[in-house]
Protein backbone atom coordinates (compact mmCIF):
# COMPACT_ATOMS: atom_id res chain seq x y z
CA UNK A 1 0.00 0.00 0.00
CA UNK A 2 1.10 3.55 -0.64
CA UNK A 3 0.92 5.93 2.31
CA UNK A 4 -0.51 9.44 2.14
CA UNK A 5 3.07 10.70 2.26
CA UNK A 6 4.03 8.98 -0.97
CA UNK A 7 4.36 11.37 -3.92
CA UNK A 8 2.08 10.79 -6.89
CA UNK A 9 3.86 9.01 -9.68
CA UNK A 10 3.62 9.30 -13.45
CA UNK A 11 1.18 7.22 -15.41
CA UNK A 12 2.26 3.75 -16.57
CA UNK A 13 0.57 1.36 -19.02
CA UNK A 14 -1.93 -0.79 -17.07
CA UNK A 15 -1.41 -3.73 -19.44
CA UNK A 16 1.50 -5.02 -21.54
CA UNK A 17 2.21 -3.14 -24.73
CA UNK A 18 4.50 -6.01 -25.72
CA UNK A 19 3.18 -9.20 -24.13
CA UNK A 20 5.43 -11.92 -22.74
CA UNK A 21 6.13 -14.67 -25.25
CA UNK A 22 3.82 -17.54 -24.33
CA UNK A 23 5.38 -21.00 -23.86
CA UNK A 24 3.46 -22.35 -26.84
CA UNK A 25 5.00 -19.67 -29.08
CA UNK A 26 8.63 -20.17 -28.09
CA UNK A 27 10.96 -21.62 -30.68
CA UNK A 28 14.15 -23.49 -29.84
CA UNK A 29 16.16 -20.27 -29.71
CA UNK A 30 13.78 -18.64 -27.22
CA UNK A 31 13.78 -21.77 -25.05
CA UNK A 32 17.57 -21.86 -25.05
CA UNK A 33 17.87 -18.15 -24.19
CA UNK A 34 15.30 -18.28 -21.40
CA UNK A 35 17.08 -21.27 -19.87
CA UNK A 36 20.06 -18.98 -19.27
CA UNK A 37 18.04 -16.57 -17.10
CA UNK A 38 18.78 -17.56 -13.53
CA UNK A 39 20.59 -16.37 -10.46
CA UNK A 40 19.04 -13.79 -8.13
CA UNK A 41 16.61 -12.64 -10.83
CA UNK A 42 15.33 -16.10 -11.71
CA UNK A 43 11.76 -15.25 -10.65
CA UNK A 44 11.51 -12.31 -13.06
CA UNK A 45 9.70 -14.34 -15.69
CA UNK A 46 7.75 -11.53 -17.34
CA UNK A 47 10.74 -9.35 -18.18
CA UNK A 48 12.66 -12.27 -19.64
CA UNK A 49 9.76 -13.65 -21.68
CA UNK A 50 9.09 -10.13 -23.00
CA UNK A 51 12.64 -9.18 -23.94
CA UNK A 52 13.31 -12.58 -25.51
CA UNK A 53 11.09 -11.38 -28.37
CA UNK A 54 14.29 -9.55 -29.43
CA UNK A 55 16.62 -12.55 -29.23
CA UNK A 56 19.78 -10.86 -30.51
CA UNK A 57 19.50 -8.09 -27.94
CA UNK A 58 18.48 -10.50 -25.19
CA UNK A 59 21.53 -12.69 -25.84
CA UNK A 60 23.91 -9.74 -25.32
CA UNK A 61 22.01 -8.06 -22.49
CA UNK A 62 21.58 -11.07 -20.21
CA UNK A 63 25.26 -11.67 -19.36
CA UNK A 64 25.84 -7.95 -18.79
CA UNK A 65 22.95 -7.71 -16.35
CA UNK A 66 24.05 -10.94 -14.73
CA UNK A 67 27.58 -9.61 -14.26
CA UNK A 68 26.25 -6.55 -12.43
CA UNK A 69 24.17 -8.78 -10.16
CA UNK A 70 27.32 -10.75 -9.31
CA UNK A 71 29.79 -7.91 -9.43
CA UNK A 72 32.28 -6.41 -6.98
CA UNK A 73 29.85 -4.36 -4.89
CA UNK A 74 28.51 -5.92 -1.68
CA UNK A 75 25.10 -7.41 -2.38
CA UNK A 76 23.33 -5.23 0.18
CA UNK A 77 24.88 -2.04 -1.24
CA UNK A 78 23.98 -3.10 -4.77
CA UNK A 79 20.36 -3.68 -3.82
CA UNK A 80 20.03 -0.37 -2.01
CA UNK A 81 21.26 1.39 -5.14
CA UNK A 82 18.85 -0.58 -7.33
CA UNK A 83 15.87 -0.01 -5.03
CA UNK A 84 16.49 3.72 -4.93
CA UNK A 85 16.78 3.74 -8.72
CA UNK A 86 13.55 1.76 -9.09
CA UNK A 87 11.82 4.22 -6.78
CA UNK A 88 13.24 7.26 -8.60
CA UNK A 89 12.07 5.80 -11.94
CA UNK A 90 8.68 4.76 -10.48
CA UNK A 91 9.15 1.25 -11.86
CA UNK A 92 6.76 -1.15 -10.14
CA UNK A 93 8.33 -4.19 -11.76
CA UNK A 94 11.91 -3.29 -10.88
CA UNK A 95 10.85 -2.35 -7.36
CA UNK A 96 8.92 -5.56 -6.70
CA UNK A 97 11.60 -7.87 -8.01
CA UNK A 98 14.37 -6.13 -6.08
CA UNK A 99 12.44 -5.96 -2.82
CA UNK A 100 12.60 -9.75 -2.97
CA UNK A 101 16.29 -9.82 -3.86
CA UNK A 102 17.17 -7.07 -1.36
CA UNK A 103 15.61 -8.97 1.53
CA UNK A 104 17.81 -11.95 0.70
CA UNK A 105 20.82 -9.61 0.67
CA UNK A 106 20.07 -8.39 4.20
CA UNK A 107 18.05 -5.23 3.55
CA UNK A 108 15.34 -4.96 6.21
CA UNK A 109 11.70 -4.04 5.65
CA UNK A 110 12.29 -0.85 7.63
CA UNK A 111 15.11 0.10 5.27
CA UNK A 112 12.95 -0.71 2.25
CA UNK A 113 10.30 1.67 3.61
CA UNK A 114 12.94 4.35 4.08
CA UNK A 115 13.96 3.98 0.43
CA UNK A 116 10.28 4.51 -0.48
CA UNK A 117 10.05 7.59 1.73
CA UNK A 118 12.55 9.43 -0.45
CA UNK A 119 13.09 13.01 0.62
CA UNK A 120 16.14 14.39 2.41
CA UNK A 121 18.63 11.56 2.80
CA UNK A 122 20.20 13.08 5.91
CA UNK A 123 16.82 13.50 7.60
CA UNK A 124 15.78 9.90 6.90
CA UNK A 125 17.94 8.36 9.60
CA UNK A 126 20.28 6.43 7.31
CA UNK A 127 23.73 5.48 8.62
CA UNK A 128 26.43 7.50 6.85
CA UNK A 129 27.44 4.71 4.45
CA UNK A 130 23.84 4.02 3.40
CA UNK A 131 23.09 7.73 3.10
CA UNK A 132 25.96 7.96 0.63
CA UNK A 133 24.40 5.18 -1.46
CA UNK A 134 21.03 6.96 -1.48
CA UNK A 135 22.70 10.20 -2.42
CA UNK A 136 24.67 8.51 -5.21
CA UNK A 137 21.52 7.04 -6.77
CA UNK A 138 19.72 10.38 -6.46
CA UNK A 139 22.58 12.38 -7.98
CA UNK A 140 22.92 10.02 -10.92
CA UNK A 141 19.15 10.15 -11.47
CA UNK A 142 18.97 13.94 -11.31
CA UNK A 143 22.32 15.06 -12.74
CA UNK A 144 23.80 12.01 -14.53
CA UNK A 145 26.99 12.49 -12.50
CA UNK A 146 28.27 11.88 -8.99
CA UNK A 147 29.31 14.98 -7.06
CA UNK A 148 32.88 15.29 -5.78
CA UNK A 149 31.66 14.86 -2.19
CA UNK A 150 29.74 11.67 -2.96
CA UNK A 151 32.60 10.28 -5.04
CA UNK A 152 35.03 10.90 -2.20
CA UNK A 153 32.71 9.27 0.35
CA UNK A 154 32.31 6.17 -1.82
CA UNK A 155 36.04 6.01 -2.54
CA UNK A 156 36.76 5.74 1.19
CA UNK A 157 35.42 2.17 1.15
CA UNK A 158 35.30 1.05 -2.50
CA UNK A 159 38.17 0.08 -4.74
CA UNK A 160 38.57 1.20 -8.35
CA UNK A 161 36.48 -1.60 -9.85
CA UNK A 162 33.66 -0.97 -7.39
CA UNK A 163 33.75 2.75 -8.19
CA UNK A 164 33.31 1.92 -11.87
CA UNK A 165 30.41 -0.35 -11.03
CA UNK A 166 28.37 2.24 -9.11
CA UNK A 167 27.38 4.45 -12.08
CA UNK A 168 27.25 1.44 -14.39
CA UNK A 169 24.82 -0.31 -12.05
CA UNK A 170 22.55 2.68 -11.53
CA UNK A 171 22.66 3.50 -15.25
CA UNK A 172 21.79 -0.06 -16.19
CA UNK A 173 18.78 -0.10 -13.91
CA UNK A 174 17.60 3.21 -15.33
CA UNK A 175 17.71 1.60 -18.77
CA UNK A 176 15.85 -1.46 -17.51
CA UNK A 177 13.24 0.73 -15.80
CA UNK A 178 12.70 2.70 -19.02
CA UNK A 179 12.05 -0.56 -20.89
CA UNK A 180 9.84 -2.06 -18.17
CA UNK A 181 7.74 1.08 -17.84
CA UNK A 182 7.40 1.70 -21.57
CA UNK A 183 6.70 -1.91 -22.56
CA UNK A 184 4.16 -2.27 -19.76
CA UNK A 185 5.76 -5.33 -18.18
CA UNK A 186 3.45 -6.42 -15.35
CA UNK A 187 4.52 -7.71 -11.95
CA UNK A 188 3.98 -11.45 -11.49
CA UNK A 189 1.14 -12.24 -9.07
CA UNK A 190 3.31 -14.16 -6.62
CA UNK A 191 5.88 -11.35 -6.51
CA UNK A 192 3.21 -8.68 -6.09
CA UNK A 193 1.89 -10.44 -3.01
CA UNK A 194 5.27 -10.14 -1.31
CA UNK A 195 6.13 -6.51 -2.10
CA UNK A 196 4.45 -3.13 -1.93
CA UNK A 197 4.47 -2.41 -5.63
CA UNK A 198 1.93 0.37 -6.22
CA UNK A 199 4.38 3.24 -6.39
CA UNK A 200 1.59 5.72 -7.20
CA UNK A 201 0.13 6.84 -10.48
CA UNK A 202 -1.40 9.97 -11.92
CA UNK A 203 -3.95 9.67 -14.69
CA UNK A 204 -2.44 10.12 -18.17
Image (cartoon, rainbow, N blue to C red):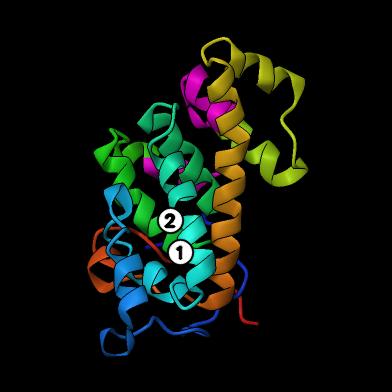
Q: Crowding near pointer 1: few (<14 within 10 Å), some, many (20+)?
A: many
Q: Crowding near pointer 2: few (<14 within 10 Å), some, many (20+)?
A: many
Q: Is residue 190 above or below residue 94?
A: below
Q: Are marks 1 and 2 in contact (CB under 8 Å)?
A: yes
| Residue on which the image places disc 1 | 92
Q: Secondary structure at mark 2?
A: helix
Is 36 magenta? The answer is: no
Residue occupying the point 54% across, 51% down: 173
| Residue on which the image places disc 2 | 95
* Residue toward you, 128 or 61: 61
Residue occupying the point 51% across, 18% down: 128
Q: Is residue 177 above or below residue 17?
A: above
* Residue toward you, 23 or 191: 23
Report the magenta stretch's main SS: helix
- Residue 50, x across and y down, in percent: 43, 75
What range is drawn magenta here?
A: 112-133
| Left or right side of 21 for 182 | right
Amino acid sequence: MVSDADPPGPWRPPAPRVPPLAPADRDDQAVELLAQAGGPAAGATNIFSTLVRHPGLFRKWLPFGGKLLAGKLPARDRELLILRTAWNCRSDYEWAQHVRIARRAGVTDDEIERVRAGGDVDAAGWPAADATLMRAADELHADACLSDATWAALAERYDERQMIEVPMLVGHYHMVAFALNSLGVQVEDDIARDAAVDIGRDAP
